[in-house]
């Protein structure tokens, strides 16, 4: 007899657990399974905001990078006698812009040097860098740090000094 009680107890527990697992599958007749409302009731609408600030993507974005140097074949060319350059950036959702220089080649990012930064975009995001008589064949990385405190984006430009091969 005690054996039958154990089997019955096991079956009752099994049936209860099975019934609990299928609760979400059961919809009473006349209900729409996707909304849990009766067919005669109007559906509740979820309105997306039409306020642009509520739908805005707050990730840092670089829209455009420009310099006061001429571009040739994907490289900004530093002519003889020029010892300054201005780099300007159009961005969205940014608090700080860092300007880095790194030599061309593999694995040079760890050797980069900070050449300037801008923390006030009210006058535009830019730096004017006085580099003296430096000879270039480098990458300049523009790193935009997001105003959301977590995103960043990097855009790279190539800079090359004029040599005999660049003359036309």
Image (cartoon, rainbow, N blue to C red):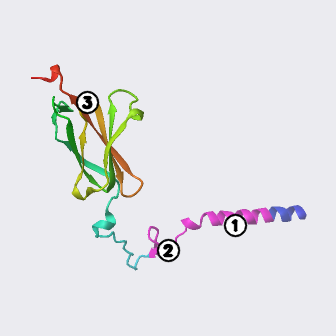
> Residue 140, image x and y in percent?
29, 37
Residue displayed at 42% across by 54% down: 150
53 or 128, nearer to the observer: 128
Q: Which-is-in-front pick, marks 3 and 1?
A: 3
Which residue is under mark 3? 134
- The earlier-in-sequence mark between 2 and 1 is 1
Q: Nearer the viewer, mark 3 or mark 2?
A: 3
43 or 22, which is in the foreground? 43
The Cα–Cα distance between marks 2 and 1, rounded to whole angstroms, is 23 Å
Q: CA distance from mark 3 to mark 2?
A: 80 Å
SS state under label 2: loop
Say if 78 sits above or below 125 in the image.
Answer: above
Q: Secondary structure at mark 1?
A: helix
User: How many angstroms separate mark 3 from mark 1 (CA)?
Assistant: 80 Å
Question: Is residue 101 placed above or below 53 in the rendered structure?
Answer: above
Q: Bin the neighbour count of mark 3 within 10 Å (Cα to Cα): few under 14, some 14-19, many 20 and up.
A: few
User: Outermost residue, left direction?
Assistant: 168
Residue shown at 15% from the left, 23% from the top: 166
Query: Is residue 17 one of those drawn in magenta?
Result: yes
Q: Which residue is mark 1?
A: 16
């Amino acid at each position: 007899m005690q054996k039958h009680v154990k089997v019955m107890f096991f079956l009752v527990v099994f049936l209860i657990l099975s019934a609990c697992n299928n609760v979400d599958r059961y919809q009473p007749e006349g209900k729409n399974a996707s909304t849990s409302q009766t067919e005669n009731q109007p559906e509740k609408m979820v309105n997306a905001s039409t306020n642009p600030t509520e739908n805005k993507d707050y990730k840092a974005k670089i829209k455009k990078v420009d310099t006061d140097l001429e571009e040739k074949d994907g490289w900004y060319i530093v002519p003889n006698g020029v010892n300054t350059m201005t780099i300007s950036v159009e961005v969205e959702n940014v608090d700080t812009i860092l300007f880095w220089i790194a030599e061309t080649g593999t694995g040079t990012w760890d050797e980069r040097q900070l050449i300037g930064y801008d923390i006030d975009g009210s006058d535009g995001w830019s730096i004017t860098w006085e580099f003296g008589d430096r000879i270039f064949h480098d990458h300049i990385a523009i790193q935009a740090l997001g105003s959301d405190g977590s995103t960043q984006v990097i855009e790279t430009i190539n800079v090359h000094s004029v040599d005999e091969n660049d003359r036309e």
